[in-house]
Amino acid sequence: MDERLVKRLLASMKCAKCNKHYEPGHINALGHQDNIWFFSVYCTTCQTQGLVAALVKDGKTAELITDLSKTELSKFGINSKITSDDILDMHSFLKDFDGDFEHLFLKDEPKK
């Protein structure tokens, strides 16, 4: 794949810190091995530097592999939004949570 095209694709990415798009002039290809490309990126808005490893394949859509049901996937998928109720529910949960994940996960399993 052409480096210019990959850089253009990366320009659609947003900075993890300030959520602004990277400018094409601040995306530098470090190299690639087969389909794996490495880039250094610099955000001019917040001056954050980063390293991006991108797996780029021509003409193929990645297969989604998940153990979520269709209902769970639609509820927790990438396009779902966190609501204020979600935040309040998490706050209530964490307020009383003692940090015992083993107990938390085992309480929902069927007893043998």
Image: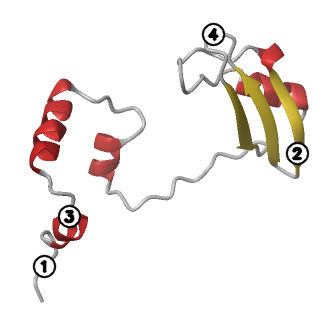
Residue 80 image position (x, y, % from top left): 34, 33
Question: Element under label 2?
Answer: strand
Residue annotated with mark 2 = 32
In the displayed structure, does residue 36 sit left or right of residue 2?
left
Q: Which mark is residue 100?
A: 3
**Picture mark count:** 4
Query: Taking 51 as reference, is 61 above or below it?
Result: below
Question: Disc 4 to disc 2, how far (Cα)?
Answer: 27 Å
Residue annotated with mark 4 = 45
Q: Disc 4 residue type?
A: Thr
Q: Are marks 2 and 3 in contact (CB under 8 Å)?
A: no
Residue 33 image position (x, y, % from top left): 88, 51
Query: Farthest residue toward the bottom?
Result: 112
Which residue occupies 17% across, 70% down? 103
Whichever of callouts 4 and 3 sits on the residue coming sooner in the sequence is 4
Residue annotated with mark 1 = 110
Disc nearest the viewer among 4 and 1: 4
Q: Which mark is residue 97?
A: none
Question: Element under label 4?
Answer: loop
Whichever of callouts 4 and 2 sits on the residue coming sooner in the sequence is 2
Question: Disc 3 to disc 1, how far (Cα)?
Answer: 18 Å
In the displayed structure, does residue 98 sit left or right of residue 41?
left
Whichever of callouts 2 and 1 sits on the residue coming sooner in the sequence is 2
Whichever of callouts 2 and 3 sits on the residue coming sooner in the sequence is 2
Question: Disc 4 to disc 3, how far (Cα)?
Answer: 41 Å
Q: Are marks 2 and 1 in contact (CB under 8 Å)?
A: no
Question: Element under label 3?
Answer: loop
